[in-house]
C-alpha cells in the first residue's frame, strides 16, 4: 500500500496563494484552490461536518451513471434496519430483470428467474463490481416495483434536499441527473447511518457465477486509507467516481464527474489529498456537544473543540474521570512550560466543568509540553480561548478509557471502569 507524504500531496495540489487563510482556516469560497483535474464537476467534502472544502461546478447536475446504485444500497440498508427485509432474504428475479442481466451493454452478472439469490449477495455484487441487474432486483424487492422504487429514491433525495432527480425506475439508470455535491451527500449519509458499509465497499473481489469479479474501485490497496465508494461510467456521464478515505480518524469524501478513464482515480487522489491537507492545516472552531461517561451525562452542552469532535479541556477531562481507574491529576510546571498528568491520582478542584467558556475561540497547536508521571511524552497540546486541550483519542490511549462520537445525538460517549486505580 502506498502511503503518501504530505509533501507529495502538496506537489499535486498546485494551490493558489489565497486558497488557505492561515488565520482562520479555509476561505469561504470553496473554489479558490486551483487543482489539476480532468473532471468537469468535482467536490471535496468533510465527512464530519458536511462542509464543502473544494468545488468545481459542484452544483451542476450531470448523469452519475452507476454511482446511482449507492442510493439503491442506502434504501436496501434502510429496509434491513427497519425489519422489512434481512441480509438472507431471497430476492426474486423478474423475467425483465433476468433479460436485462444478459444485456452486453451493461455491467452485469447473469441472473435467472429460477436462481436463488440473497439480499447480501446481490448488494455485494452491486457495490463491488457494479452489477446493474442485481441493483434493479434489489429495487424491485424493496419498492415492490421499479416505479415504486423510483418514488422511494426521489423521496429520499427530497428529504435530504439534494440536487438529484430519478426519472427512471431502473435502479442504475444512466440518465438520473444529480450534482457532485448530491453524490457526496449520499456517500456521507450512507457512512453516517451505516458505518459498517465500509466492510462491503472495501471488498477487493467477489466470486459469483463460476468466476472472480474484481472491484471497480482501483484506489483500494493503492491510496492510503481508501475504503469506498462507487464508480460510474457511461457515454453520457464519462468516467466518474465517488471516493472516500480515512486517515487518523479523519474522513474525506471526494467526487469527480465527467472525468476520463485514464484520470478518474488520479483526479480523486488529488481531491482527497486536498481534503486532508485542508482539514489538517486549518484551525477549527469550538463545537458544542454533550459528554457521557458510562451512560451518565457528565458535561451537558460543553464545547468539544474541533471539527472532528475530539478535543477536550484537560482539566475538564480529569474532573470527569475522577473516581475511575482512568483518573489523573493535573499539575502545571511554569518553569519548564509542561503540563504533568499524574496517572492514578484523583483530580482535586472546587471548580466544576467549565463547559462553554472552555472552548471559545479557535483551536491551534500549542508549544506547551506534556508529561505523564513526570515522563515526557510525544503528544500535542492545543489551545483555545486561553485553555489547554488534548485529543480525546490520545487521552484514551494514555489512561485506558474508550471513546466514540455519536453523531445522531451529538454526544461524546466515554466508558471507563469504575473504581480508583492503585
Image (cartoon, helix red, strand yellow):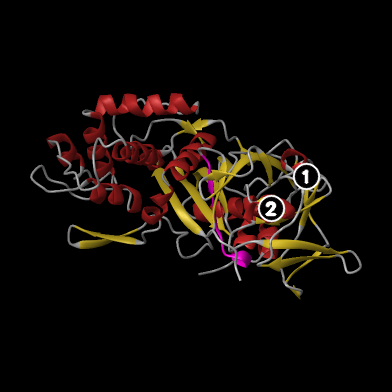
Residue at the limit of the structure toward the right, as seen here: 335
Front residue of 92 and 422:
422
Label 2, label 1: how far apart the Cα atoms are: 23 Å
Q: Which residue is mark 1?
A: 362
Nearer the viewer's eye, disc 2 or disc 1?
2
Question: Going by the image, does 114 lie left or right of 195?
Answer: left
Name the spot of residue 406 as percent of width and height, x first: 52, 44
Residues in magenta, as a range: 397-407
Residue found 56% across the figure and 31% down from its top: 59
Give the residue at mark 2.
319
Q: Report whether residue 25 is seen.
A: no
Q: Which quadrant holds residue 45?
A: top right
Residue 322 percent location from the top left of the image: 65, 56
> Residue 372 is drawn in which quadrant?
bottom right
Pointer 2 local density, CA inside 10 Å: few below 14, some 14–19, many at least 20: many
Residue drawn 81% across the image and 58% down it? 366
Do residues under tags 2 and 1 come within 8 Å of each other at their CB atoms? Answer: no
Q: For the residue labelled by badge 2, is the local secondary structure a helix, a strand or a loop?
A: helix
Is 186 located above or below residue 388 in the figure?
A: above
Who comes first in sequence, dot 2 or dot 1?
2
Classify 10 Å Cα crowding around label 1: few (below 14), some (14-19), many (20 and above). Answer: many
Q: Quadrant of residue 168?
A: top left
Question: Relative to 108, is 247 on the left or the right?
Answer: right
Q: Residue furthest bottom?
A: 375
- 349 and 265: which one is in front? 349
Amino acid at each position: 500500500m502506498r502511503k503518501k507524504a504530505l509533501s507529495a500531496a502538496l506537489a499535486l495540489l498546485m494551490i493558489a496563494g489565497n486558497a488557505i487563510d492561515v488565520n482562520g482556516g479555509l476561505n469561504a469560497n470553496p473554489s479558490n484552490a486551483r487543482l489539476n483535474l480532468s473532471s468537469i464537476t468535482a467536490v471535496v467534502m468533510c465527512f464530519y461536518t458536511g462542509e464543502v472544502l473544494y468545488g468545481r461546478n459542484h452544483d451542476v447536475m450531470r448523469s452519475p451513471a452507476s454511482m446511482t446504485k449507492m442510493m439503491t444500497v442506502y434504501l436496501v440498508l434502510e429496509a434491513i434496519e427497519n425489519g422489512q427485509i434481512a441480509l438472507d432474504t431471497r430476492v426474486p428475479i423478474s423475467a425483465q430483470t433476468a433479460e436485462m442481466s444478459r444485456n452486453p451493454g451493461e455491467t452485469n452478472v447473469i441472473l435467472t428467474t429460477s436462481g436463488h439469490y440473497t439480499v447480501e449477495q446481490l448488494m455485494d455484487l452491486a457495490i463491488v463490481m457494479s452489477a446493474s441487474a442485481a441493483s434493479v432486483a434489489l429495487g424491485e424487492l424493496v419498492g415492490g416495483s421499479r416505479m415504486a422504487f423510483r418514488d422511494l429514491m426521489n423521496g429520499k433525495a427530497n428529504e435530504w434536499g439534494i440536487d438529484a432527480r430519478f426519472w427512471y425506475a431502473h435502479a442504475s439508470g444512466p440518465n438520473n441527473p444529480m450534482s457532485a455535491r448530491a453524490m457526496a451527500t449520499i456517500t456521507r449519509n450512507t457512512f453516517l447511518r451505516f458505518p459498517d458499509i465500509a466492510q462491503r465497499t472495501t471488498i477487493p473481489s467477489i466470486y459469483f457465477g463460476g468466476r472472480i469479479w474484481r472491484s471497480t474501485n482501483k484506489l483500494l490497496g493503492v491510496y492510503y486509507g481508501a475504503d469506498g465508494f462507487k464508480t460510474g461510467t457511461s457515454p453520457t456521464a464519462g468516467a466518474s467516481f465517488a471516493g472516500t478515505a480515512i486517515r487518523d480518524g479523519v474522513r474525506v469524501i471526494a467526487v469527480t464527474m465527467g472525468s476520463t478513464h485514464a484520470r478518474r482515480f488520479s483526479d480523486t487522489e488529488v481531491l482527497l489529498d486536498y481534503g486532508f491537507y485542508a482539514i489538517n492545516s486549518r484551525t477549527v472552531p469550538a463545537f458544542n456537544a454533550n459528554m457521557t461517561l458510562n451512560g451518565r451525562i457528565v458535561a451537558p452542552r460543553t464545547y468539544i473543540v474541533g471539527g472532528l469532535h475530539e478535543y477536550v479541556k484537560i482539566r475538564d477531562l480529569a474532573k470527569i474521570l475522577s473516581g475511575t481507574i482512568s483518573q489523573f491529576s493535573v499539575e502545571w510546571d511554569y518553569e519548564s512550560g509542561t503540563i504533568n498528568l499524574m496517572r492514578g491520582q484523583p483530580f482535586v478542584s472546587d471548580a466544576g466543568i467549565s463547559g462553554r467558556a472552555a472552548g471559545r475561540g479557535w483551536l491551534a497547536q500549542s508549544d506547551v509540553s506534556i508529561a505523564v508521571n513526570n515522563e515526557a511524552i510525544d503528544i500535542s497540546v492545543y489551545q483555545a480561548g486561553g485553555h489547554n486541550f488534548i485529543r480525546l483519542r490520545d487521552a484514551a490511549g494514555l489512561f485506558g478509557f474508550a471513546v466514540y462520537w455519536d453523531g445522531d445525538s451529538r454526544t461524546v460517549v466515554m466508558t471507563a471502569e469504575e473504581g480508583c486505580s492503585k
